[in-house]
Every structure is written in C-alpha cells, then in structure tokens.
Image: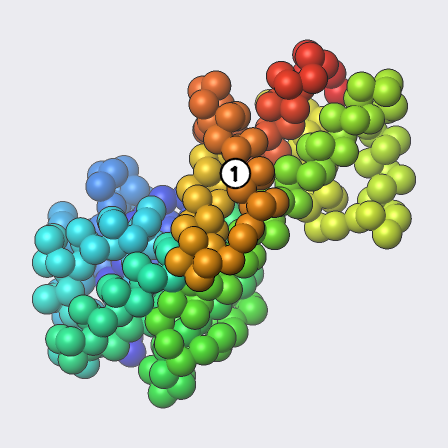
C-alpha cells in the first residue's frame, strides 16, 4: 500500500498526513479549508479539490474528520468511497459512537472494500510526534495490511478486536476516564481554593501522592493559568462525553459520573468558552462557588 487519500487536515490531521509523507507514502489530501490543503502541498503532499479527488485510486483512505456524520457525507454523498481502489481500505480515525461506526463499516464492506475502525488518543502533541495511541478493530488480515500506515502515525498501535465498533468502544472508555479525571481535578482544586490553599503547593503534593494521575499532572498546571495554550478544547469533551453517554444508553449501562462530567463541560461551553483549553472546565467550578477564578 503506497498511495493514501487523507480527508481532514485539521490540527491533528495535517501533522498525521505529514508523518505519512515522511514515511514514504504518496499522500493526496482534502480539507474544507484551502489553507490546510496548501500546507499539505508545502510539506510535499498533493492537494485535492474534493474528497472524491483525494480518494481516487487510493490504496487506503484515512478519515480524520469531526464525527460519524461527516464521515458518512465524505464517503457516500461526496463520492470518496467510489474513488478508493476496489480492494482498498477505509481507515476511520475519528472519535465516533460505536454503533454508527459499525453501520458505516457494513456499507463500506458491501462494496467489497475493507474497513478499519481505528480511533486515536494523544492529541495534537501525539499527532505531531507520531506518538499517538491507536486502537484498531478489523479482521486480523486487514489490520496487518494497514499496520505500517498506523505505525507511521503512532508508537502504540493495538489490535483491539475483529469487529468494527470495538475500536470506538475502547476510545469511548478512554474518553470517559479522561473527562471524569479532568473534572474531578477541577473539583478538588475548587475545594482547595475555597479554603485558601495555594494551588501550586497542592499540585506539587498531590502529584507525588497516591492521588496523582496523568491528567492531574498534565491539566493541573494549566488550571492554574488564566488562558493556557489550547491542546484540547472544552467542546471536544462536550462531544466525546456525549458519545460516552450514547454508548451507555445503547448498552443499557448507567454512567452517572460521565453524565456529571458532561454537564460541567457543557456548562463551560454554554458560557461561550467551548474553544478554551479543556482544563478550563475549572471556570465552571469558580462560577458555581463564587471564587472568581482565584488561582
């Protein structure tokens, strides 16, 4: 597999496509933003004017789009699937509900092409550094065909199952834990602020205690900043925790902590702060407790 169509050249998609170029693949990319297509061309890739053009003759079509609805539009309404080689593979890397992923896979496989459900974790930093965690679900033979492509994008590539939707399920569980962890760090900080504790000292103590977590160490320092650099936005967790709750409904599994975390991110977004770094869910705690954003 040498020729790759790549749809979705956003903050993660563009560096991912660039890493595929560095690995020696021929990459033809499309994005609704012309400047993103131009950036791919400057990196050595080929720009396309439509999704169908990007997919034409591709051995593999990588979709790094916003959601399942966008993937469906690109594949079917925009005609990208018809451009993929008859024995080609569609690789969906966006975070989507498991049920919707399974539905897309069935429609792709009906055309004789293969489908890999392979969401990623690691954010922009992982996309740039090719250190993403990739959770791929597909028949083993299909997974092995795309493994070199996935390994050009991430250093932790897992085959999590044979059925489409299983990769999405693993990513859903990941986002449940991430979202709840961020929210509970903000809650702990809110209590400390109310009692006048220096959050810098608290962070140092908690970071070295049994209460520590990766999210505490990563998001905690950014919660102490008024306007930190954005590495993952509040609205991403509005979307992803919504997917978590949808998966829970489909499986008839109660997820009360995820529901509360979702409401906190939703409240932050509702105040017009959906584009802020996701650590700023702490602003909702400050709003509820009248602490005025004290750090």
Q: Nearer the viewer, residue 192 or 53?
A: 192
Task: Specify the quadrant that holds the N terminus.
Answer: bottom left
Residue 227's place in the image compared with 50, above or below, is: above
Across and down, in percent, residue 140 comes to 40, 85
Q: Say which residue appears at 47% left-offset and 26% top-offset.
A: 269
Q: Say which residue appears at 10% left-offset and 66% top-offset.
A: 82
Q: Is residue 94 visible?
A: no
Task: Report whether 133 appears left or right of 186.
Answer: left
Q: Nearer the viewer, residue 255 or 122?
A: 255
Q: Residues within 10 Å of mark 1 (few under 14, many from 20)?
A: many
Across and down, in percent, residue 110 comes to 15, 76
Q: Nearer the viewer, residue 247 or 63?
A: 247
Q: Of helix, strand and loop, which one carries label 1?
A: helix
- Dividing the picture into quadrants, the one containing residue 180 is top right
Q: Please tell me how many numbered marks the rendered image carries.
A: 1
Task: Report whether 234 appears left or right of 177.
Answer: left
Q: Is residue 249 visible?
A: yes
Task: Report whether 35 appears left or right of 293.
Answer: left
Q: Say which residue appears at 49% left-offset and 45% top-offset.
A: 241
Q: Nearer the viewer, residue 25 or 83?
A: 83
Across and down, in percent, residue 17 comes to 36, 57
Across and down, in percent, residue 108 comes to 20, 70
Residue 18's place in the image compared with 1, above or below, is: above
- Dividing the picture into quadrants, the one containing residue 247 is bottom left
Q: Say which residue appears at 57% left-offset and 38% top-offset.
A: 260
Tag 1 residue: 262
Task: Specify the quadrant that holds the C terminus.
Answer: top right
């Amino acid at each position: 597999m040498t020729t790759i169509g790549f749809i979705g050249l956003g903050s993660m998609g563009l560096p991912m496509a660039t890493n595929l170029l560095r690995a020696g693949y021929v990459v033809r990319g499309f994005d609704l933003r012309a400047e993103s297509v131009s950036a791919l061309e400057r990196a050595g890739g080929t720009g396309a004017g439509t999704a169908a053009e990007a997919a034409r003759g591709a051995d593999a079509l990588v979709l790094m789009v916003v959601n399942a609805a966008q993937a469906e539009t690109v594949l079917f309404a925009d005609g990208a699937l018809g451009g993929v080689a008859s024995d080609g593979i569609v690789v969906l890397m966006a975070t989507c509900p498991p049920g919707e992923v399974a539905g897309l896979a069935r429609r792709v496989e009906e055309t004789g092409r293969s489908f890999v459900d392979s969401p990623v974790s690691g954010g922009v930093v992982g996309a740039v550094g090719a250190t993403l965690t990739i959770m791929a679900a597909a028949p083993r033979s299909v997974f092995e065909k795309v493994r070199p492509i996935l390994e050009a994008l991430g250093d932790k590539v897992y085959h999590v199952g044979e059925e489409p939707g299983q990769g999405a399920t693993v990513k859903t569980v990941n986002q449940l834990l991430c979202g709840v962890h961020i929210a509970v760090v903000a809650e702990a900080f809110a209590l400390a602020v109310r009692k006048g504790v220096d959050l810098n000292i608290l962070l140092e103590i908690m970071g070295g205690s049994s209460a520590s977590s990766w999210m505490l160490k990563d998001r905690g320092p950014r919660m102490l900043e008024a306007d930190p650099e954005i590495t993952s936005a509040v609205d991403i967790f509005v979307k992803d925790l919504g997917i978590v709750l949808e998966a829970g409904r489909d499986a008839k599994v109660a997820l009360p902590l995820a529901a509360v975390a979702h409401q906190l991110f939703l409240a932050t977004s509702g105040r017009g702060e959906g584009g802020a770094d996701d650590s700023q869910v702490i602003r909702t705690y400050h709003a509820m407790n009248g602490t005025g954003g004290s750090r």
